[in-house]
Image (cartoon, grey):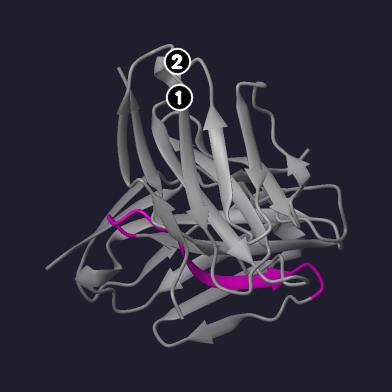
């Protein structure tokens, strides 16, 4: 069975602080995909990044960066110089298998509040 | 290009009733997945449809069902509503062969009283 753990439930930071959102996953499959989604108050999930199990290269996109470490089964997300607009719920998700499998297993989510 | 649309956005039903939610995918997307989001259980996969066929199913009782039409629009139905069915129901669509790139709609907020 697959599992995604986001141990942090709520994080509050002051604008311009850096913040890291942790994600730990469990799967016995060797082929899998990891995702991060952002859910603003409007409700829809906004895709941020996807990583497959064969690509451990870290990624940076503007103020966002992701650290994927298979050795610790972690896929952490860092926001540098946070802004009020980053306030949202962030979900880490996992999908296993190489075939057509859109079933995502989500973590419980982390509510990030960025105060001005 | 229009995004995924879901109707209605808000719904209030009484326990024991049934409800039908609708999802229109992005034009050209043929796969539609449904998720339930509750404060207690979080986001959980309900089912996925492709070319009018259910391809994947989550662990939900048979009261939850869905279907997909030839134009890729999808509906999900919940019969004999229970208080615990109160949730945000999200649908997502993706292109054939790009299941890993799902685009989510704004959801339907269902309240069961």
Q: Rounded to the nearest whole Å, what is the CA distance between mark 1 and mark 2?
A: 5 Å
| Mark 1 surroundings: few (<14), some (14-19) or many (≥20) residues within 10 A | some
The residue sitting at 48% across, 86% down in the picture is: A61
- Left or right of residue A95: residue A116: left
Query: Mark 2: which secondary structure?
Result: loop
The residue sitting at 69% across, 58% down in the picture is: B70
Numbered disc total: 2
Q: Which residues are magenta?
A: A40-54
Q: Please state the horizontal and vertical placement of residue A51, each as a whole percent of the image.
A: 68, 71
Residue B31, quarter of the rendered image? bottom right
The residue sitting at 86% across, 52% down in the picture is: A29
Q: Please state the horizontal and vertical placement of residue B22, each as a whole percent of the image.
A: 48, 47
- Residue that numbered label 2 is attached to: B82
Residue A14 forms part of the magenta stretch: no
**Chain letter, disc 1 residue:** B
Residue A47 forms part of the magenta stretch: yes
Quadrant of the rendering where the C terminus of chain B is positioned = top left
Kindly give the residue lying farthest to the left in the view shown. Answer: A116
Q: Please state the horizontal and vertical placement of residue A114, each as a whole percent of the image.
A: 22, 63
Q: Is residue B98 visible?
A: yes
- Left or right of residue A38: residue A50: right
Kindly give the residue lying farthest to the bottom in the view shown. Answer: A62
| Mark 2 surroundings: few (<14), some (14-19) or many (≥20) residues within 10 A | some
Query: Mark 1: which secondary structure?
Result: helix
- Residue that numbered label 1 is attached to: B85
In the depicted structure, whether residue B17 falls above or below residue A23: above
State if disc 2 and disc 1 touch (CB < 8 Å).
Answer: yes
In the depicted structure, whether residue B43 falls above or below residue A74: above
Judging depth in this view, the residue of B68 and A94 nearest the camera is B68
The residue sitting at 50% across, 78% down in the picture is: A65
Judging depth in this view, the residue of B11 and A110 nearest the camera is B11
């Amino acid at each position: 069975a697959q599992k995604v753990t986001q141990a942090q439930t709520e994080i509050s930071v002051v604008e311009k602080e850096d913040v890291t959102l942790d994600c730990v996953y469990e799967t016995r499959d060797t082929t899998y995909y990891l995702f991060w989604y952002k859910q603003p108050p409007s409700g829809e999930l906004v895709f941020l990044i996807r990583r497959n199990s064969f690509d451990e290269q870290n990624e940076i996109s503007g103020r966002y960066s992701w650290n994927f470490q298979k050795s610790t089964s972690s896929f952490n997300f860092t926001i540098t110089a946070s802004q009020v607009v980053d306030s949202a719920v962030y979900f880490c998700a996992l999908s296993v298998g190489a075939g057509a499998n859109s079933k995502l297993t989500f973590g419980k989510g982390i509510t990030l509040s960025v105060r001005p | 290009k229009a995004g995924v649309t879901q109707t209605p956005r808000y719904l209030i039903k009484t326990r024991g009733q049934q409800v039908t939610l609708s999802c229109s995918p992005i034009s050209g997307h043929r796969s539609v997945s449904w998720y339930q989001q509750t404060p207690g259980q979080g986001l959980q996969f309900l089912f996925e449809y492709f070319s009018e066929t259910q391809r994947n199913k989550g662990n939900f009782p048979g009261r939850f069902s869905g279907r997909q039409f030839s134009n890729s629009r999808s509906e999900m139905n919940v019969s004999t509503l229970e208080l615990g069915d109160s949730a945000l129901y999200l649908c997502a669509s993706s292109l054939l062969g790009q299941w890993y790139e799902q685009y989510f709609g704004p959801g339907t907020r269902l309240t069961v009283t």
